[in-house]
Image (tube, grey):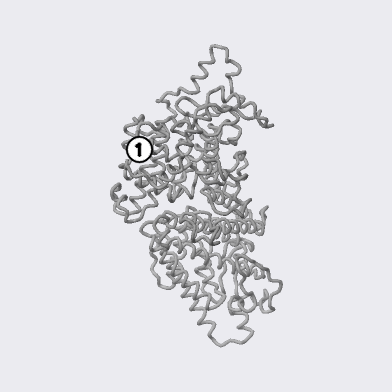
Amino acid sequence: MSNKKDPMFTRWKALNLEGLLQKQVTSQAGTPVGGATSPLGAPSVTGSFSESEIGGFETWGSPMLGNVGTLQTSQSGHVRYIPLASQWESVVAKSPAAECLRSSETDIADDDDLQIPLARNGNISRAELLALLPPSRYCDTLKEVYFRVFSPVFHILHDLTFEAEYQQFYHDPGSVSTSWLALMFAILAIAISALDDDDSLLSDLGRERTVSRNIKVLSARYRSAALRCLAADGVMTRHSINSLQALVLISYARLHRGLPFWTLLGFTHHVAISMGCHIDPERFPLGSIEREERRRAWAGMMMLYTIQNSSFGSLDQSNISQDVKMPIDVDDVDLLTGSGIPPTSDPTSSPSAARPTQMTYLLLSFRLHKISNRICEHIFTYPQSRFTSDQLESELFAIQEICDTRYQDGVNGNHTSLPVHHQANLHILRSHIDQLFLLILRPKMCRFLQGEVTAEMCTARGRCMSVAKSAISNFQTLLESSQFAGPYKWYTSGLGSFHAFHAAVVLAVGLLNPESQAEFDDTKELLGKSLDLFASLSVRSIFCSKAVPIVRQIIEVSSTQYTKIQQQQSKPQSQTSSQIQTPLHSQTPQHLPQTPLHHPQMYTTLPSALTSAALADSYALAHSQSLSPVPTVSSSCSDPTMQSTFGIHLHPQNWLGPTSVPWDSLGSSVGHASSQYGFESDVM
């Protein structure tokens, strides 16, 4: 490995954290079980507790203690949760069977057939696993990339602990466990996607002709190596905190590659349960760091579960235990020293906090995903949902306010002087919030497009356009700002581009029904800009390569239709006929001014000109359900081809995640509309 230490480790040494670690180890040896402080008595944070220490946990006075078992840690560092009802040792402790039972818990044959699902090529030696690692200088680089870019976004590790273990691995590669090697490979698999297109590391390690292919192949290579390490460690029957962390990160890596991981996540969930992570670690004699590592791994896994659950349309999570506190909102160094630890783990309960911590983003993101799950239920059960759109919007506004407050510099009162990763995290949170606002507002906007022109629906339409513009602007900042462009291209070419494409489609709907010439011009210009943004990522992102031709055709078809409408309206007509035939939005500005997103207001009156009779010829419903959230408006004074075919695929269920977008049908719909005007379809 390189002799050059990274800044994190230098800072760590300066703070004499090695001494703190050793001090905690020493104090732990003479501390009663109920007062254990830190598990870091060995190179691995899994710690090691004797059976007598675990048995001493009975002194806890919790009324739920009777339902809590113990944690059994083997000599190899593997951890198993033993439910109280399964503790046979208390019954047969003095019988000859006792030793046999203890052995059966820890001694699992290396060739156990349960390893087959995670080991295609049979057994593999430690030397062979180490040979799968890239050269040491590349390990250093990718590790630093991970902790600079991804750890602040998905903070499930204790960075300082991993750094200490990495330095030990640097001096003695054979000293770490195979589960730790699995974690290392998972980190490499994720970090690869944050490299610049022209980074020589990609071409040195990969042999593919394109950047996207190199990233895909290398990421798959290291994910596969991580699974092979887990198989060698016996993950089907033996587990440690490192193996759980590796499984969570592998699922996270697959999520951002757009790969299925539902089955792997289910396995990860059961590994966590087998380690007792479904029970809050305060009930076990664990140190502060190991308690938080367990909570972080559980929180990360549950967030992935919520994301995947929503995308599958399976909304019931009642069978998933939630008897685990959220991780504490604290920096890793403060967790180690014991200073500055807040009394609560919920960042939403302390919006006046001076600054964001390493955990703030994950905690806020977790909260947003829970709201997202309720929004999905609202969409799928609309209009009989048990949640109202106003309730969901209020929750989002609250999170939005907390984000704006937490991500401020205590001196300057803004976020621009914060570290780059905090600024990027704020933009990603805003992107997520905009996405959720668009989903909440979609039913009302569609009712407006279908002819239900009330003050509430008009306001919803205006807010949808405002949120969509904000989303495109946020996407542009992340993609074009020099401090974000390189490290966060993994986001802009993935989930970020999906959010931006969703916003672009919403703007396209507005472009088909503009409220004024000025709005049409501004929206068309913004869509043109979004087209350029998608095009710049098309070489790296398959998603963007699919979005480019669709956005291009939307702009062309919308412009042609709008021109046709304008020509029809320019013909001499009577004043009454003009009031009826003119598109609704051309009258809106003087009667229905748009309201800011953060201060929504409802209109109480409508001008007499905007009656249902006047709208009869302006809107023709193309869907049997008047309250359906599918926009199917077709104006009588325009060709309905695009609205009727393109609109069918704008159902909110198609915009819950990147994998739910109906590319084939969406492309063919726009392509069919474009063929009416002589445009060539180049979709995919």
Q: Residue at x 65, y 70 (%)?
A: 453
Query: Observer-nearest residue: 332 or 207?
Result: 332
Residue at the spot of label 1: 170
What quarter of the picture does the C terminus occupy? bottom left
Q: Is residue 582 above or below residue 311?
A: below
Q: Quadrant of residue 664?
A: bottom left
What quarter of the picture does the N terminus occupy? top left
Query: Observer-nearest residue: 170 or 495?
Result: 170
Horizontal side, residue 649 vs residue 138: left or right: right
Q: Position of residue 489 (x, y in %)?
A: 41, 56
Query: Observer-nearest residue: 643 or 403?
Result: 403
Q: Is residue 471 above or below residue 124?
A: below
Question: Helix or strand or loop: what does disc 1 sit on?
Answer: helix
Horizontal side, residue 452 vs residue 290: left or right: right
Q: Position of residue 438 (x, y in %)?
A: 56, 61
Q: How many marks?
A: 1
Q: Position of residue 621 (x, y in %)?
A: 60, 68
Q: Residue at x 42, y 30 (%)?
A: 233
